[in-house]
Image (spheres, rainbow, N blue to C red):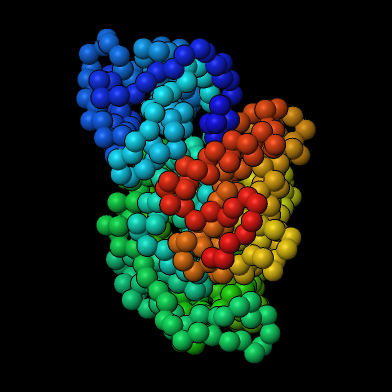
Amino acid sequence: MMILPLPQRLVPQSGFFTLDSSTSIQATAFATQTATILAEKLRASTGFSLPITNQPGGKGIVFQQSEEDLGPEGYRLEVTEHQVVLGASDEAGLFYAAISLLQLLPPAIFSQSQETADWHIPAQQIEDHPRFGWRGFMLDVSRHFMPVEFIKTVLDLLALHKLNVFHWHLTDDQGWRIEIKRYPRLTEVGAWRKNTLIGHGHTENKVFDDVPHGGFYTQAEIREVVEYARQRHITVIPEVDLPGHMQAAIAAYPELGNTGQQLEVCNFWGVIEHVLNPSEETLKFLEDVLTEVMDLFPSKYICIGGDECVKKEWRESEFAQQRIRELGLKNEEELQSYIIGRMDTFLHSRGRKLLGWDEILEGGLAPHATVLSWRGEKGGIQAARAGHDVVMVPQGYLYLDHYQSEDQSKEPLAIGGCNTLEKVYHYNPVGWAAGPEESRYVLGTQANLWTEYVNTPEHAQYMMFPRLCALSEMAWTAPQKHDYPAFLERLNVHLKRLDVLGINYRPLDEVVEV
């Protein structure tokens, strides 16, 4: 049994079902979308144009809405010699049943062109459901822009691994990637930098290439991506990072800054001192931007970042100090909390929830905020114990911009640190919790790929896989069933699927140049 992530329960049976041109797909309206996706996948690789019918009977693949409550995203899959029956309480569950079905076929089933193979499916019974409701991946496209077609590839790969959240980091100091019609200079100016730092550049003598870099997504492209994700039961959560990580926006609109200087879009990495000023005009700008963001993204959560906001300019700004006094705040930390709180109120008034990195705890946590705990687990534990939802994303386990081996000489340049495949697999997002009263606030987990040192889709794939395979099983499968050696056995088979899909993953037993 080579399904990944490992199902909660699987019982092998004798015999097998043979997929051939006489097979039909039987589906009611409840299952039409998933049935259509499956039929298209099977036609591409097998050449069989399987009809979709709402008439039961005969040899076929049968989609059913389960009368029994199988839970959110749960499913039941039964394979006999005569039928394959997929049942679920919701459409997402049916979709994941179809994903498992595909993985029961030879890896060639994932080919985009017709292949010859024995299309046998071993007889078995599977009952399955996810461990966490939030199983995600974050991709930073601000440091290096990634084209729409690659974003769709990422979504297909998330679906293959039963991951259901795509966190899209769209703005930062080094590039603004989302079209905002009310503020066109955000992309006319903010989406482009003149060149890019070479190497880590930790010294003052930084070296730059001579290649301008940039790009952005139009609102039409974003709607296309969001719909593509919806069909794969993936929620796209946008991130507009504020009030720090805003140099690209300040370069486009200098009045947003604290110094009045005309800045350029940043061309190096690190924590940047330039941050938004705390004026009412700036807060109105943020509300205008978030209004357009909410129109594009129907997600419950909107991420506003809130991380690494350097307070130096606020300490030196008479206007910022005056605002602190006017608002009755104690210090710059409370000023940041005030800005985050305003965004929280604004989003909440429109039926959305604010999501932010754990720095939003500093100066007081906004009442409706959900926390991404990245600086270890401390912030997430603090938020959960205060009754706030959290997503556990500690960098020491789940940051995919870290090296994949302790021998850094054999790896492409990365930001530092080492998160191996095994380390990702063994992370437990609720290992700290004393019991269900605390762990119930943990929505789930995700892995994050920041792209300072990742400048192509091929390199991004190398950093994502196979570590996202480990995240998939850690987040889906019950912890008592986690078995790293057994996972590696299934992963060796699973990598053949990635080979067919043309994914540039890091090999398990050797390292290749990117």
Q: Quadrant of residue 488?
A: top right
Left or right of 183 on screen, residue 356: right
Residue 246, position as x, y percentages in the image: 50, 71
| Circle count | 0
Between 253 and 78, the residue placed more toward the observer is 78
Q: Is residue 361 visible?
A: no
Residue 346, position as x, y percentages in the image: 45, 53
Between 369 and 266, the residue placed more toward the observer is 266
Residue furthest to the top: 57
Between 52 and 319, the residue placed more toward the observer is 52
- The quarter of the picture where the N terminus appears is top right
Residue 63, position as x, y percentages in the image: 34, 20
Q: Is residue 312 visible?
A: yes
Seen in the picture, residue 276 relative to 223 is either above or below; the reply is: below
Q: Quadrant of residue 434?
A: top right
- Rendered residue at 62%/73% (across/down): 270
- The quarter of the picture where the C terminus appears is bottom right
- Rendered residue at 63%/77% (across/down): 200
Seen in the picture, residue 306 relative to 124 is either above or below; the reply is: below
Q: Quadrant of residue 383?
A: top right
- Rendered residue at 56%/57% (across/down): 463
- Rendered residue at 42%/81% (across/down): 212
Residue 141, position as x, y percentages in the image: 46, 63
